[in-house]
Structures are given as structure tokens and as C-alpha cells.
Image (cartoon, rainbow, N blue to C red):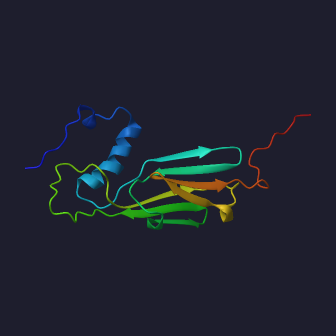
Amino acid sequence: MSIIRYNANEFVPTTFSALVDRFFNDSITRAGGSTFVPKTDVVESATAYEVHLAVPGLNKEDFNIEVNDNYLTISGERKFQNEKKDKNYHAIETHYGSFSRSFTLPENVDASKINAKYNNGILEVTIPKDEKKVLKQVIKVN
């Protein structure tokens, strides 16, 4: 018999977005799948875009970051290591397996200067804007 934590709000998503997120995030891992979708923040500043992925428990070598045809793809894998025979797991809520997230890049970025750093479980990918490719332009009416 397995024990499953009951959450009253788990079965009634409060928004359509939560319903879609639950479908794509939870259904795969609960069915015994080996993929997960890390939570992601996308931030824009005056000089760059930043993508922050919450992926604790990995090493920087576990990530693969590629730019192909204006798509930024970040992938990796967190492996479950149950080597200690003296431990009996009663609940495992941490997601294990592979993940992949893709983002369409705007036209005003310099893909050759993208960099990434991994600190305290957060992967931060910085995508600098290209100053020569300004997307917004103000036109005065005469």
C-alpha cells in the first residue's frame, strides 16, 4: 500500500492556466514517467532577457543549452540515486528524470552573447539585447 498526500485543492484547479500546467507537469510524473517540467521565470530588463529555471540538485555539467533557428532550448536530467539500502522512502515529491524547455527568441537579441550560470538550484540564462536591432520605434505625426 502506498501513502499519497491529500490536497483538497489538487483536484480543482483555480484557473485554466493551472489546469493546463497540472496536465503537462503532473500527469507525466504521476504516471511513472521519467520527465518533468521545471518552473521558469522570464524577466526582461533594458539590456537583456533572463530565463530562470528552478532545477535544484543538478550540476552545471547536467545542462544542455542550444540556440537553433531563433529557439533557445534548455534541457538536462536529474537522476534518482537510491544507493543507500538502509533508507525507506515514504514520499518522494522531488521530480526526477529529463526535462526540456524551448523559448522563441525575439528578433532583437544577440544570440552569440548568451551566457548561463547555475547558483543555488537556479539556472540563469542571460540573453543580451542587440542595440542595433531596436524593435520599438516612435514615429511623430506631422
Q: Position of residue 6 (x, y in %)?
A: 19, 37
Residue 106 seen in this snapshot: no
Number of numbered discs: 0
Q: Position of residue 67 (x, y in %)?
A: 58, 65
Of 13 and 89, the residue lying toward us: 89
The C terminus lies in which quarter of the figure? Answer: top right
Q: Quadrant of residue 69?
A: bottom right
**Identity of the residue furthest to the front in this view:** 86
Residue 8 seen in this snapshot: yes
Q: Position of residue 64 (x, y in %)?
A: 49, 67
In the image, taking residue 7 as reference, residue 35 lies left or right, namely right
Q: Quadrant of residue 86?
A: bottom left
In the image, taking residue 76 as reference, residue 3 lies left or right, namely left
Of 115 and 120, the residue lying toward us: 120
Q: Residue at x 48, y 63 (%)?
A: 60
Q: Position of residue 52 (x, y in %)?
A: 52, 50
Q: Residue at x 39, y 37 (%)?
A: 16
Q: Residue at x 77, y 50 (%)?
A: 134
**Identity of the residue furthest to the left in this view:** 1
Of 129 and 142, the residue lying toward us: 129
Q: Residue at x 81, y 39 (%)?
A: 138
* Relative vertical location of residue 51 with respect to residue 72 in this rendering, above or below: above
